[in-house]
Image: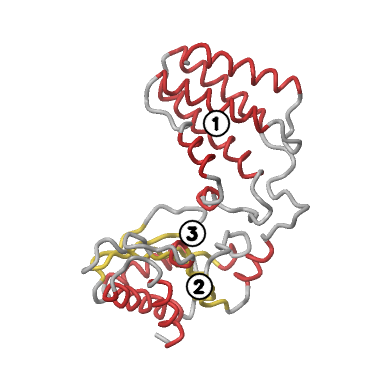
Amino acid sequence: MSLEREALLYDLLSFGSLLPAQVETRARWIGSIIDRVIEDPSTTGLLLGGSLSRRQADEWSDCDLFCLVKDDARTKRDEYLERLAKSEHVRLTFPQPSYPWFGELLTAVFDDDHAFSVDIGFIEHTDAQDFFWEPTGIVLDDLTGVIRRSIESRKTTSDQNPFGPKLPITTLNLLALKVRKSLTRGCLWNATEYVQQSRRSLFAMLRAQLPNDSYVGAPDRYVEQKLSSRDLERLSQTCPAYSEKEIGIAMNQILSWALEMTQVSRFDCTPTLAAELTKINQWFENEYR
């Protein structure tokens, strides 16, 4: 590991509550993996992301690495599953489901520190421009410059709305009708699924109201960090327990909040649609409040 990279890792890890011995150990483990990835001829880029890059890591934080490769991403992930499993101090490695914001993912867990793991997402070079590279991440390697260009291209300016001028409020209205129908029939599973879809529509509306330093294509977990504490509290109230009353209350919360946001001009909500939303929301209010 180069002295510059070693100093960087020590600096990032020292911001949390780790003991000096933990800082030294984790820096050594992360550095050994970074060296191995960068030295691989198929690697064209590497970004360190997550809480560690933001200097917000604590004892329970993992390390997120995003690796850009020339080869098939899943094949490369499987290769590293075997390679890292043979490494000293690595207790186990296992594949994770493929996430749009992480590529083909694996996790490595270490012998002497079970609270710590390293997640590595492999992204094919052909997908690099469309992939969401964390804007707060630290670029460790970028042979072609594609990671830096992608981050720069996703920055928005004050006159841009990165999520478009029209949002699917019509979809939210239809989902509310499906929730009511499911509850009337006693189908709680269906109702819960429709509420979750409604939450995503609501979240899309929240995204559109973020300050203009947001980024096009940012995954929901990144957007969530930009919400106010009040919005996060309200959002928690839209996640229902598995009961008819709680599902109805959650839907009422979602629709009430959406109606408040329709007052903002960027939302495409006609008077007729607003009246329909108000009417269906009144039904949830009357039935479950």
Looking at the image, do the residues carrying marks 2 and 3 touch, with CB atoms under 8 Å apart?
Answer: no
Kindly give the residue lying farthest to the left in the view shown.
Answer: 112
Q: Earlier in the sequence, mark 3 or mark 1?
A: 3
Identify the element where label 1 is drawn: helix
| In this view, the mark in front (2 or 3) | 2
Q: Residue at x 28, y 70 (%)?
A: 85
The residue wearing badge 1 is 198
The residue wearing badge 3 is 103
Rendered image coloring scheme: secondary structure
Q: Residues within 10 Å of mark 1 (few under 14, many from 20)?
A: many
Q: Residue at x 48, y 31 (%)?
A: 238
Identify the element where label 2 is drawn: strand
Is 174 on the left or on the right of 107, as rendered? Answer: right
* Cα–Cα gap, marks 3 and 1: 26 Å
137 or 15: nearer the eye? 15
* Residue 201 image point, x, y percent: 59, 35
* Cα–Cα gap, marks 2 and 3: 13 Å
Q: Residue at x 57, y 68 (%)?
A: 125
Looking at the image, do the residues carrying marks 3 and 1 touch, with CB atoms under 8 Å apart?
Answer: no
> Mark 1 is on which residue type?
Ser
* Residue 285 image point, x, y percent: 53, 16
The residue wearing badge 2 is 46
Identify the element where label 3 is drawn: loop
> Mark 3 is on which residue type?
Gly
